Amino acid sequence: MRNTLGTNDPSVDPNTFNNYFVNIASDILSKLSPVQMDPIKLMLNEQLSNKDYFEFLEVSVIEVRSTIKNLKNNNSRDIYGLHTLLKRSLIQLSHH
């Protein structure tokens, strides 16, 4: 499995590995343009039109199960390396 450092080499120095994750947030922030918007107003949605934001909604266990059951039958994996068929099997086990 390939890690986020872009190497399969298990001999990566632990300090290099650790420093990558310690510094990744500041590295990303240093590459971003300055924001011209007040973050408090942004969170209160005063400067955005309705089409420019999203919100998290609560979903039920039934909705999650239904979504997993409707996934295509293939060998693709999610970001955690889990197959669709494995997820379906887990859903079936959870009913028992």
Image (tube, helix red, strand yellow):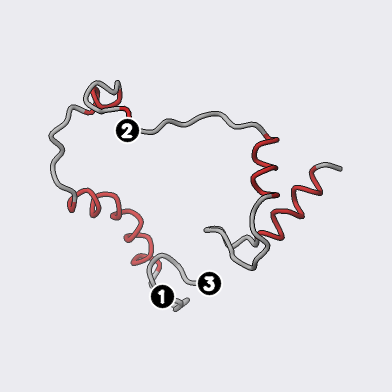
Query: Tag 1 or tag 3, which sits nearer the N-term?
Result: 3
Quadrant in which residue 50 is drawn: top left
Query: Tag 1 or tag 2, which sits nearer the N-term?
Result: 1
Which label was assigned to residue 22? Answer: none
Which one is in front, 52 or 79? 52
Q: Which amino acid does label 2 sit on?
A: Lys
Please give left or right for residue 15 compared with residue 9 in the image. left
Residue 74 at x, y percent in the picture: 65, 66
Please give left or right for residue 55 compared with residue 44 in the image. right
Cβ atoms at labels 3 and 1 below 8 Å apart? no
Q: Mark 3 points at which residue?
A: 1
Instruction: Describe the element under mark 2 as helix, strand or loop.
Output: helix
Which label was assigned to residue 7? Answer: 1
Q: Name the residue under label 2.
A: 51
Which residue appears at 30% of the width and 55% of the height? 24
Residue 43 at x, y percent in the picture: 30, 25
Instruction: Describe the element under mark 3 as helix, strand or loop.
Output: loop
Q: What residue type is labelled 1?
A: Thr
Label 1 environment density (alpha carbons within 10 Å; few <14, some 14–19, many ≥20): few
Q: What residue type is labelled 3?
A: Met
- Of the two numbered discs 2 and 3 in the rendering, the one whose residue sits closer to the viewer: 2
